[in-house]
Image (cartoon, helix red, strand yellow):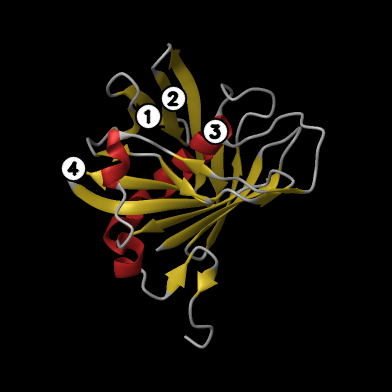
Amino acid sequence: MIIKISQTASNIKQSYDVDIGDAYYRGEAGNISRYQPVTLVGKEGELKGVLNTLRAWERLFDVTKNGSSHGSFARVKDGLFSKYYSISLVEGESFKCYCISKGRFEYIPIYRGDVQIALVETFLSVEDYKYVHKLYLLDEYACFAEMLALFVIYYAGFVYAQRYHMSSGSYYGYSWSFSRHNKKYDPSWRETHFPDENFFGKLNIFK
């Protein structure tokens, strides 16, 4: 499964179009502040993340689905200059997300235990600060698609969102991360599980 999360508004709004399979969703991050709620709304209802705890190295958002407790996102300190993000569901499932920058892309491999189940790719060159994120998710974990898509919006609201910017046009970004978690990124993972795709679409337009 490939989920595309396209930012449609920047500056005074942080809005996203989200395609999960054949279903369309609308996403929102905080318009005024990164600490405001994040939402993902589709025909089955709404997922909403609300700030619960804010400390120097902990940023916990509680997530509800149609008003009922569903899980949480948290930034976790993991050493002096190291961190990762955790996703927890009320049913007991949990995932770890490692943020790794390599040149013109940022990658977030997502693990369930020792198994990588997903990969987020973000192209760092954008128009008008409207970023596009692609989430590659193994089909057997499709039931977590909504929660993972909301996590991408939550993360983008903190890292990529440009609020009240006065500029427009093209922005060419490059970044490199130096973390002991860099080894969590396997450059062959997407090619192995999604051999006919890359960030920009199908490798063969006739398939």
What is the C-alpha distance between the residues marked 4 and 3?
25 Å
Q: Secondary structure at mark 2?
A: strand
Q: Secondary structure at mark 1?
A: strand
Q: Residue at x 51, y 88 (%)?
A: 206
Q: Residue at x 42, y 38 (%)?
A: 177
Residue type (three-letter) at the residue carrying disc 3: Val
- Of mark 3 and mark 1, the one earlier in the sequence is 1
What is the C-alpha distance between the residues marked 3 and 1?
18 Å
For disc 4, the marked residue is 113
**In this picture, is 6 found above or below 182?**
below
Q: Secondary structure at mark 4?
A: loop
Residue type (three-letter) at the residue carrying disc 2: Phe
Crowding near pointer 4: few (<14 within 10 Å), some, many (20+)? few
For disc 1, the marked residue is 72
Q: Are marks 4 and 3 in contact (CB under 8 Å)?
A: no
Q: Residue at x 41, y 76 (%)?
A: 196
Q: Are marks 2 and 1 in contact (CB under 8 Å)?
A: yes
- Of mark 2 and mark 1, the one earlier in the sequence is 2
Residue type (three-letter) at the residue carrying disc 4: Gly
Q: Residue at x 27, y 21 (%)?
A: 79
Compared across the picture, whether 196 is left or right of 192 comes to right
Q: Are marks 3 and 1 in contact (CB under 8 Å)?
A: no
Which mark, residue 159? 3
Residue type (three-letter) at the residue carrying disc 1: Ser
Crowding near pointer 1: few (<14 within 10 Å), some, many (20+)? many
Query: Which image quadrant for residue 100?
Result: top left
For disc 2, the marked residue is 61
What is the C-alpha distance between the residues marked 2 and 1?
6 Å
Crowding near pointer 2: few (<14 within 10 Å), some, many (20+)? many
Badge nearest the viewer, 1 or 4 = 4
